[in-house]
Image (cartoon, rainbow, N blue to C red):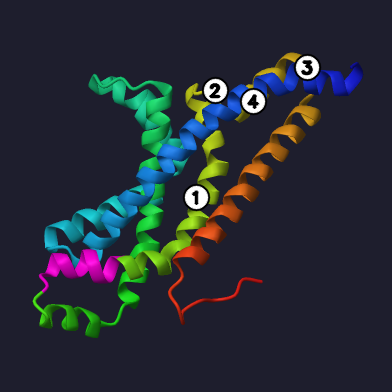
Amino acid sequence: MTGEAGFIFNELMPSLLRGLWMSLGLIVPSAVLGFFLGVLAGSCRVYGVRALRWSAHVYVALFRGFPLLVQLYIWYFGLPRLGVYLSPYMASVLGFSLCSGAYHSEYIRGALLSIKKGQVQAAQAIGMTRLQTILHVILPQAVRRALPGCGNEIIYLIKYSSLAYMVTCIELTGEGKIIASATFKYTEVFTVVGIIYLALVSVASWGLGKLEDRLALPGFQYHRA
């Protein structure tokens, strides 16, 4: 195989596949940690005591307000000034998780506020504690309602995981940048990189749609276009 096809299949794809595995290694734990942070922060903002509500509001304001790239620079380049050293991978996962959690918390908070207060009163009337009511009555419904928004945040996470190479964590975009700089075939390289991201987003969208259908409550389904 010669020419452009030979370059793509013999030189480009092996490097991009290596970068793809690193990207998946960033996306999966960041998505899981970010979601749980969002549930925790969102719950604290709605049902927490004053100190917890204030702390959660500050967390969300900071991590939604600072650009993600600035956050990554702080974790990787800034923390060593305080004697804390993180690997590029750990700095990236930390940055993605905290930023994603702040956005997830908004969807969770909105979903929690949409639950009618009568359900809380009914749960307490049968002897459930406040914590039991939140964990077993409110949160399961809220998570279902927030899932479309949270799924959208996961889609964003797939794409902004490409920023990891800025702190020397060489994932899919980083591998593409290295090859493009060496061969000057920027159009070919980043077209293939874009196609891979498109495939990741498409698979994630399909999976999230299936999850929404599986968790849908009878009588509360909606139809996607």
Residue in front for this viewpoint, 70 or 189: 189
Residue in front for this viewpoint, 141 or 160: 141
Is 208 colored magenta in this rendering?
A: no
Q: Residue at x 55, y 59 (%)?
A: 210
For the residues carrying marks 2 and 4, which lies nearer the camera in this image?
Answer: 4
The amino acid sitting under disc 4 is Leu
- Mark 1 or mark 3, which is nearer the start of the sequence? 3
For the residues carrying marks 4 and 1, which lies nearer the camera in this image?
Answer: 4
Q: Which residue is mark 2?
A: 170
Q: Which residue is mark 1?
A: 154
Q: What is the CA distance from the residue labelled 2 to the residue labelled 3?
A: 20 Å
Q: What is the CA distance from the residue labelled 3 to the residue labelled 1?
A: 32 Å
Q: Which residue is mark 3?
A: 10
From the top left corner, tell me how far across and down residue 39 is, in percent: 31, 56
Depicted 37 relative to depicted 79: above or below: below
- Mark 4 or mark 3, which is nearer the start of the sequence? 3
Q: Residue at x 24, y 19 (%)?
A: 83
- Mark 1 or mark 4, which is nearer the start of the sequence? 4
Magenta-drawn segment: 128-139
The amino acid sitting under disc 3 is Asn
Position of the N terminus by quadrant: top right
Position of the C terminus by quadrant: bottom right
Q: Residue at x 35, y 58 (%)?
A: 105
Res 17 label: 4
The amino acid sitting under disc 1 is Ile
Q: Secondary structure at mark 3?
A: helix
Name the image quarter holding residue 197. top right
